[in-house]
Image: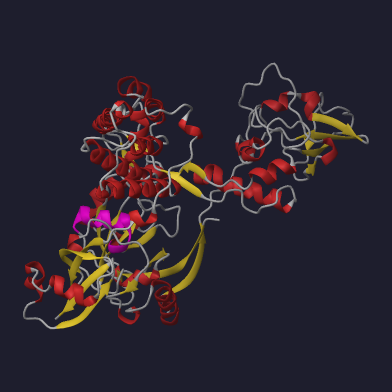
Amino acid sequence: MGRSEGAEVDFALEGRSEKLRIFTTRPDTLFGATYMVIAPEHPLLEPLTTPDRRQKVLAYRDSVVSKSDMDRTALTKTKTGEFTGAYALHPITGARLPIWVADFVLGSYGTGAIMSVPAHDERDFEFARAFGLPVVEVVSPDGQLHDTAAWTEAFTAEGVAVRSGFLDGQRTPEAKAAMISHLEQKGLGTRRVQYRLRDWVFSRQRYWGEPIPVYFPVDLPPGSTDPRKHPHTVRYGEPIAVAESELPVRLPELEDFKPSDDPAGPLSRALDWRFFQKDGQWYARETNTMPQWAGSCWYYLRFIDPHNTQEAFSKEAYDAWMPVDLYVGGSEHAVLHLLYARFWHKVLFDCGVVSHPEPFGKLVHQGMILGENNEKMSKSRGNVVNPDEVVQKHGADSLRVYEMFMGPLEAVKPWQTQGVTGVRRFLERAWNTLAFVKEEPGAAEATLDEESLRLLHKTVKKVGEDIEALRLNTAVSALMILTNRLADIPHVPLEAAKTFALLLSPFAPHLAEELWERLGGTKSLAYEPWPSYDVALTVDDVVEMGVQVNGKLRSKVKLRRDATEADVRAAIASDPNVLAHTQGKTEKKFVYVPGRIINLVVG
């Protein structure tokens, strides 16, 4: 849990004896490092900073103090930082790499310093673009060299090493291993496994919460007989677990359960509950309680059998429901709940209470929705959007569809009220196009032209697959395209309209139900089967492909899906956009992957 494999690498500092140590999970990208970034709290920040940069750097450091880790590392925030005036030396090439300070690097994780490889890391890329720093491609998707000047985002996937000396031509896994071996042989770095876990302070000094089933021996001085009335000493270094037969330990009834300055917590005031005798020896119960996480760590297990009064859950209920197929939760949930739920579940697994070592089959973090000013919504910033007001003005379906259409589920994205209006227009167009189809003469017998029929079947396929993969934004986009096509047809067939209503129902259930009823449905569409599609109608005979010259897109061409290399060459032979970059040059390689790649390598 929280495990990262990679390497620690030492970068020499220009003019100094210290080393700047970084941890990276992508040592294969070392040749692509173009600058360094250290955390504002890094101990070398002040010693490194040159006199001419000192005032700005220290002012920047002070401005970061009040920010949370989540605010500092948010992908969507504007990248900020200051150049320290210092340089590190690349451990292999000896190149001078400027050292910056930026808040997105945390002193609490790794070494508090990073090598920045902007071509292959999203944050590094955005920072480089913001401050005009070099972007050098060292991992290529196809083994070819590409010009990063036109890139709008980093390439973060695995690929083939390029511009990387002895690593060139190796796939990412092999390049990682080769680089780590090289670093270790040269004494420049070491293989390292890191864990990013947050300590769990489990106890709470409050009344509400499960009592911790632990007690301690109590010593009384001579002449004292009752710790509730006389001075005493609790031997906290000798905890004793409450016997299983005495569980659960229940909270005592208290008239005053408010917290106080006493670190022992409110339960310390319940003297008759706290102190008890066993075999003539006095004992004191633990007065701290468990946090709310104690219950939420296993709530999913109770949910499967909530009315069972004899056990936490029955075996039958567990076998029917567990493990959880899909868990959708915010990123702030990742440590504060989900990590501990896994710990808790593994303990129950070791105890034989559950049958699976992991509670959740798949986890998806939904992205945060920011205010229209691209900042986290909060009352203090005045950018909170009240969903009730949006529903009142545009309808619940408009709000629902817009939230799914905003972007990928996992992405952080800003709210745009204008976008809700656009979604409302889409729903209105769908209604106006389909609501009266049943009343049109011949609607039951009408058929779609071939192009429209293909689009309908492609949409059924895409929406179904996108829902399974949680690509909700592209599913909505596909429905918008289909709506525009159907709106241009004089007579929409009844079956096509009913299929559309079924496809729309997961996104705009209220409107879809109304459409379904108007189209002749006699019961809720929730009980209807999902539409099917003809695979043959979802595959185009003709596809449009980009034509690259030396890895750069220069033109596009339409070809039959089964086109041969000879067909491709004939199709692009007289293309002026291709000829402009190939005439007078020697063809070194011709790459053609049907339906995917056309790339001419010339020199």
Question: Is 289 drawn above or below residue 128 in the view shown?
Answer: above
Would residue 17 be visible to someone looking at this image?
A: no
Question: Is 494 drawn above or below residue 386 in the view shown?
Answer: below
- Magenta stretch, residue numbers: 119-132
Q: Position of residue 235 (x, y in %)?
A: 78, 41
Tell me which residue sits at (76%, 38%) in the image. 213
Tell me which residue sits at (66%, 21%) in the image. 257
Tell me which residue sits at (65%, 46%) in the image. 344
Compared across the picture, whether 602 is left or right of 419 comes to left
Question: Is 77 drawn above or below residue 165 in the view shown?
Answer: above
* The C terminus, quarter of image: bottom left
Compared across the picture, whether 209 is left or right of 151 comes to right
Report which quarter residue 215 is drawn in: top right
Q: Position of residue 205 (x, y in %)?
A: 63, 32
Rendered image coloring scheme: secondary structure
Q: Position of residue 212 (x, y in %)?
A: 72, 37
Magenta residues, dominant SS class: helix
Question: Is 111 drawn above or below residue 427 in the view shown?
Answer: below
